[in-house]
Structure formats: structure tokens, C-alpha cells
Amino acid sequence: MGMSLPPGIRIQSADLDAAEISWFSALCNEDCRFLGELDEDLRSNWEHCSDIVRLADRLGYQNILLPSGYVTGQEPIPFAAAVGALTSQIQLLVAVRMGEIHPPMLGRALSTLDHLLQGRLTVNIISSDLPGETLDSEARYARSREVIQILKQGWNDERISVHGQYYDIDLGCDPVRSYQQNGGPLLYFGGISDSARELCAEHCDVFLMWPETEERLVETMRDMTTRAATYGRTLDFGLRIHVVVRETEEEARAAAEALVSKLDDHRGAELNHRSQDSRSAGVLRQDELRAQADPHGYIEPHIWSGIGRARSGCGSAIVGDPDQVVAKIERYLSLGFRAFILSGYPHLEECERFARLVLPRLRTCRLPVAYGRVPAERPATPLTHAPRK
């Protein structure tokens, strides 16, 4: 039985009272013990990043984000193809920048990956500028819309037929059919501009949000519910957030402070603006929230914004003891969130710590279950962890 949601919010997986709990593999060379000090042992390379994925797989996380950054890391599609053979149950959330690869070939590459993973592929749609070019927001999302249409037609229809501003394509679909039927891989999407929201409402499955106050999160979820309804659709909502959990609240707050203890403002600004999307509406909103935080960096109880001092994008963390972290995640569940993409520094250690202190206390699921996209040859059991008695 699903839980009651706030007025004005509807979700695709309303009948699930569980969440997809995902981790993060630091492909974009941001792993560290102290923000601002990159450790050679934690650099983005095959050995370290694949270790993160394999650990998350063994510990029972349902998904893991493989991010994309042109300057700062490894390419997620070939990384996913290689690491997929080393994992058994975890899904891979592969970040793909729209327009980098000719869309029919991108569709075929992702379909091939979906077959290699036997349906464990999910896709994070990225619409930031391509390396060496700058487009306004409306143009970037218009191009992304055409790419997504080509991908979905290739995975599901008899032909690809898109005649738009950026692509004029008419092709057969046989080389592009996905392993997952009834829609293809789930599309996860983040962006808070008007153009971004409209694109997600029309074409994507999971609207990813960065940390904000609960009031602002609910406001955005209501807006996205209304937009999706105009297309006869419902979405699911996901939260990308860091976590600092320790046995006591005092230890957790101390660990958060230690993380930024060696960071100066110049180095923080350098790291904050190295990404292709460092001036996006979402990043600017994270900066605004951090400016409004209390003297210790908290935008509301247990939500600490200090990570954003040295990171473009998701800039806040849940900070607390296991009971407090569980309570905050359950609070987000009650608001309508069904996907959580978590991370912590350093990523291997915090992946293990969260799995030991928190994960067994959460009801978890693989989100494609709600969409009927898990193939018949791989039956799904939504509940993989039960709350402790």
C-alpha cells in the first residue's frame, strides 16, 4: 500500500512505499578526504572507480550514478560496459550529454549496453553545453528533446522519424531495439529552468532534484506534477544528495567540519567552476541556498551546505546519526521522493558506512518495477531490504 502524499503531488510509483537507494562513482575526479585536496590514491581511474561500483553492488545498493565531465574524468558509456561484467545486481545510471554522439548511434550504443547488462541500464539525461560550444538554455533543451525522441523511437517503434531543427532522420529501428521492453531504459533528468522542466514533464521518467528546503522541494514537485499532467503523464522524483552519517550526531557534525577544514576560498572557487554546467540555474540556486544558511552552513536541520563551497552541482549533505538520517530519508519518502542518489567523501569508505548504519533499515526497490520495464526473463522483487525490528 502506498503512502499519502502532500496535496498537489502525484507520482508514477504511488503504490510503492519503498525507494531506490543509489550510490555515486567518482568518475569526474572529485574523490578526496578533505575538499580542496585531491588525493592521488583517490583519483578517477579504472581501478578506483570500478572498486566503488563493485562495492555498492555487493552491499545491495539498487543503482549507481556514473557521471559525465568532459575535462575532469572518464567517459561513462565505455566504463559502464566494462564494469557491468563485474557486477551482478546493481543497475548503472549512465550520464549522457545530449548532442555529443549522433543520436541513432547513441541509441544503438545504449541499447547494446542494455543488452550487455540484461536490463540493468538507466540513463541520466544531461543537457549542458558541449565542449567548445555555448548555447542558450532554450536551444540546449530543444536539441535534447529531439535526441530523446530519436532514442525512444529507436528503442520502441518500427522506425525513427524525427524532422526537427537539429536532426532530420528517417531510419529503421532494428539495430537500436533495447533489451528492456515497454519503454526502454528509464530516463532520469535534472534541471530547474522552465525549458528543462517542460522537457522532463513531456519525455522523462524521474525528475532529479538537488537539495533545497522541504518547502522549495514540494513547490517544485507540485509544478512538475502539473506540467506532466498536461501530457497525460506522471513522473517519479529523485534527490541527489551527499550524506555524512556517524554513530552520534556530534561525530557526524565534526566529520562534516573536518571535510572542509583544509579548504580556502580560492581553491573552492576553482573547483566549483570547472564543470561544463557551473553557471546553470540549478548551480546558481545551490549557491543562493548556501548564502542563506546558518553560521554553521545548515539550510535546515540536518541539511548542511558546506560541500557546495568546492563542488559545482549538488552542494548539500544529510548530516546526523543513523536514526536522524533514516528519519530524514523517510520524511523525503513521505513527500513523494522514490529515488535517492547518495555519496560521501571518500566514496569507498562512506559507501560501506552508509550500507552498515542505514541501508538495512530502509525499504528499497528497483524503480523500473513501477514502470513495468523489467524483462520477463529477469523477475523483479521490489523489496530487497526490510526495516529492522
Image (spheres, grey):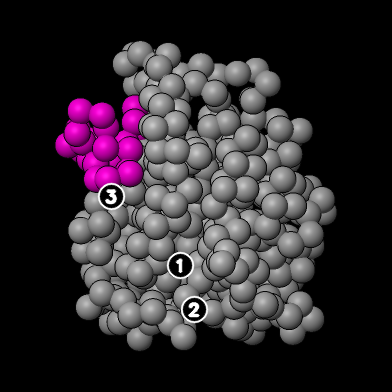
Q: Is residue 31 magenta?
A: no
Q: In the drawing, what numbered circle is on residue 312? A: none
| Count of numbered marks | 3
Q: Is residue 89 left or right of residue 62?
A: right
Rendering coords of residue 382 (x, y %) = 62, 76
Amino acid type for the residue under numbered disc 1: Arg
| Three-letter code, disc 2 | Leu
Q: Foreground: 371 or 352?
A: 352
Of mark 2 and mark 3, the one earlier in the sequence is: 2
Q: Secondary structure at mark 1?
A: strand
- Considering only vertical position in the picture, is 181 above or below 245? below
> Residue 188 location, x and y as percent?
49, 62
Q: Residues within 10 Å of mark 3 (few under 14, many from 20)?
A: many
| Residue 250 placement (x, y as % from top left) | 39, 32
The correct choice, above or below, for 42 with respect to 52 in the image is above
Between 250 and 46, the one lying in front of the other is: 250
Badge 2 element: loop
- The part of the image, by quadrant, that contains residue 290 is top left
**Residue drawn at x 31%, y 63% as measured from the top left:** 197
Q: Residue at x 77, y 68 (%)?
A: 118
Q: Position of residue 58 (x, y in %)?
A: 74, 52
Residue at which label 2 appears: 16
Give the magenta-colored segment's residue range: 284-309
Give the Cα separation between the discs numbered 2 and 3.
Answer: 24 Å
Q: Residue at x 24, y 41 (%)?
A: 299
The answer to whether residue 60 is visible is yes
Question: Foreground residue, 117 or 135?
Answer: 117
* Pointer 3 residue: 212
Distance in Å between CA atoms under marks 1 and 3:
16 Å
Looking at marks 1 and 2 on the same chain, the residue that comes earlier in the sequence is marked by 2
Q: Which residue is mark 1?
A: 338
